[in-house]
Every structure is written in structure tokens, then in C-alpha cells.
Image (cartoon, rainbow, N blue to C red):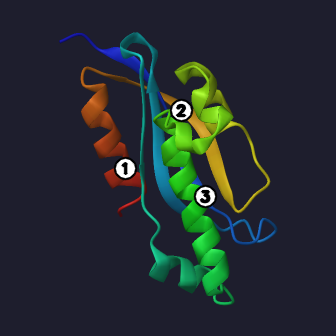
Amino acid sequence: MTATALEYCVLRIVPDIERGEFLNTGVIVVCRARRLLDCRLHLDRDRLQVLWPALDRETIDLIDAHLRMVDLICHGDPAAGPIAQLDWRERWHWLTSPASTIVQPGPVHTALTSQPETELDRLFSRYVQT
């Protein structure tokens, strides 16, 4: 199999931007050659609580809802509204645009892989599950 270019972005939760701390919570990948846009997300509530001791239940629920919306937008689900109806390339750019919210995309990185579908699992394991 031939290697193809892949771009990825790690999503992170940033409780206090001035402290510079964050918790990786997901990975979004795009492979233009395969027209693939996909994500894996996980909210580790225990680790987040350690990083953000004053975190309340309402804020955790809002973060969880935000992550569910990212998944819906990534997969073009109409339940996510007009952004989810955009072309997959536009959704990728929208999902990876800098944000000043608690859930933020990190920088976009590139990689070469012969299996873009399984590369997402590897990236998720490396950056989120460790």
C-alpha cells in the first residue's frame, strides 16, 4: 500500500488559559486522498477534576455536550445544524480553527500513512489515552 498524507489535530480542554495547562480529549483527522474526516473523543472526568478542582457538574455537562457536537459535525450529522451540512473540507477547517473556549483545537500536524483509518486509533491512543 502506498503512503498518503494525513493531517490531524488534538482537541484539548483548557480550564484556565493563563495557567497554560490542558487535557487532551480527542483527535480529529483528515485524509484528502481518501476523503476521510473522522474523530475519536473521550472526556476523562477524573483527570479533568484533578486539573480543575473547582469544576462543577454543569460545566462538565457543557464540555461533554461540546464534544458530542464535535463528533456530529465531523460526521456531517444534520442534528449538528448548518455547520454539519458543509463539505467535509470546510468542516475540517471549522473544527480546527483556533477558539477561545474551554475546548480548543491544538495545532494541525501532518503525517504519512498507508492506513489512514487505523492511524486515527494510533494517534488517539498516543495523545489521549496515555
Can see residue 111? yes
Secondary element at image label 2: strand
On the image, which quarter does residue 107 sit in?
top right
In the picture of the structure, the residue carrying the numbered disc 3 is 66
Residue 46 x %, y %: 46, 82
**Residue 45 position (above or below residue 12):** below
Q: How far is the residue under mark 2 from the one under mark 1?
A: 14 Å
Q: Residue furthest left?
A: 1
In the picture of the structure, the residue carrying the numbered disc 2 is 109
Characterize the local packing of mark 1: few (<14), some (14-19) or many (20 or more) Cα atoms within 10 angstroms: many
The residue located at (58%, 74%) in the rendering is: 61
Which circle's residue, 2 or 1, is located before the other in the chain? 2
On the image, which quarter does residue 121 sit in?
top left
Can see residue 92? no
Secondary element at image label 3: helix
The residue located at (53%, 32%) in the rendering is: 109
Which circle's residue, 1 or 3, is located before the other in the chain? 3
Q: How far is the residue under mark 1 from the one under mark 3?
A: 18 Å
Q: How far is the residue under mark 2 from the one under mark 3?
A: 23 Å
In the picture of the structure, the residue carrying the numbered disc 1 is 124
